Image (cartoon, grey):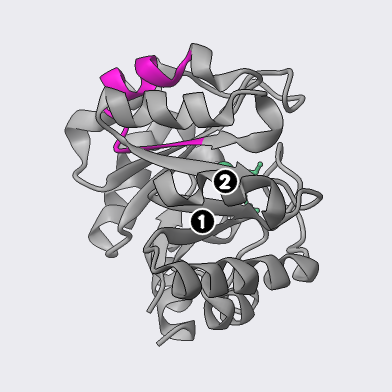
Amino acid sequence: MIKVAPSILSADYVNLQKDIEVVDNAGAEYLHIDVMDGQFVPAISYGAGWVKAIRPITNMILDVHLMVQNPERYVEDFVNAGADLVGVHVEATPHIHRALQMIKNAGAKAEVVINPGTPVEMIKPVLYMVDQVLVMTVNPGFGGQKFLPETIKKIAELDQIKKDQGLDFDIEIDGGVNNETVVAAYQAGATVAVAGSYVFDDADPASKVNAIKEATK
Ligand code: DX5
Ligand code: ZN
């Protein structure tokens, strides 16, 4: 069964605590926090202050996805705010190895993220040091986009590398995930599924967390 990471990007910001409690009680393992800087992606979302505010109200794994140019400027702030796991895009820095090292040295789990147009080849040198790889299944920046099926082969490629090299990182998918699109990704080796609009655009987000889990039993 896949682990589920509801993305608060699609939650109700004025009732955020309620939305977080609903998915926590539904058994979601991660809470996905999308940080956008208006440069790497067009939108601006929220910063480390949100992580600090959320930390005391849940024990879910706080999974911070930095869609930020030169993320090494901010990784320590997010770890200090209470992030358990911090993800940095390989496309956002010429210093991906250093950015991942900084996350680990600060005491959090380190994730490398690849866009749909980026091959697995780009991150091979750092796979030995990561706890998770995020394979974007849409182009980053917005919730509510359509899942790109061509990303599945990259998930399978990473799963094969795990086996060949005896590595044990999680493989997360993000974008357009629902109870249908998750199936092929899970079969290819995805272990964590981010879902934003599918979960929170529903009157009953708990049922959507369950539907993703049921689809991958
Ligand atoms: C997109 C973000 C996603 C977003 C997913 O740039 O990284 O985490 O919240 O939204 P859905 O699940 O609606 O595609
Ligand atoms: Zn995300």
| 148 or 170, nearer to the observer | 170
Q: Is residue 193 left or right of residue 70?
A: left
Residue 203 can be seen, yes or no: no
Q: Residue at x 51, y 58 (%)?
A: 172
Give the magenta range.
Answer: 74-87
Q: Residue at x 45, y 32 (%)?
A: 100
- Residue 1: give x, y in percent of width and height: 37, 79
Give me the disc on residue 194.
Answer: 1
Give me the disc on residue 125.
Answer: 2
- Residue 104: give x, y in percent of width and height: 32, 32
Amino acid type at image mark 1: Val
Q: Is residue 20 above or below residue 97?
A: below
Q: Is residue 216 above or below residue 173?
A: below
Q: Is residue 141 left or right of residue 33?
A: right
Judged from the image, the secondary structure of the residue bearing numbered disc 2 is: helix
Residue 82 can be seen, yes or no: yes
| 86 or 143, nearer to the observer | 86
Q: Is residue 204 left or right of residue 161?
A: left
Frontmost of labels 2 and 1 is 2
- Residue 162: give x, y in percent of width and height: 47, 68
Q: Residue at x 64, y 36 (%)?
A: 90
Q: Residue at x 52, y 44 (%)?
A: 126
Check mark 1 vs ligand 1: CB closer than 8 Å? yes or no.
yes
| 136 or 10, nearer to the observer | 136
How many residues crowd around disc 1 within 10 Å: few (fewer than 14), some, or many (20 or more)? Answer: many
- Which image quarter has ligand 2? top right
Which residue in the rendered view is the most extreme toward the top? Answer: 73
Whole-number angstrom distance, CA of label 2 to CA of label 1: 25 Å
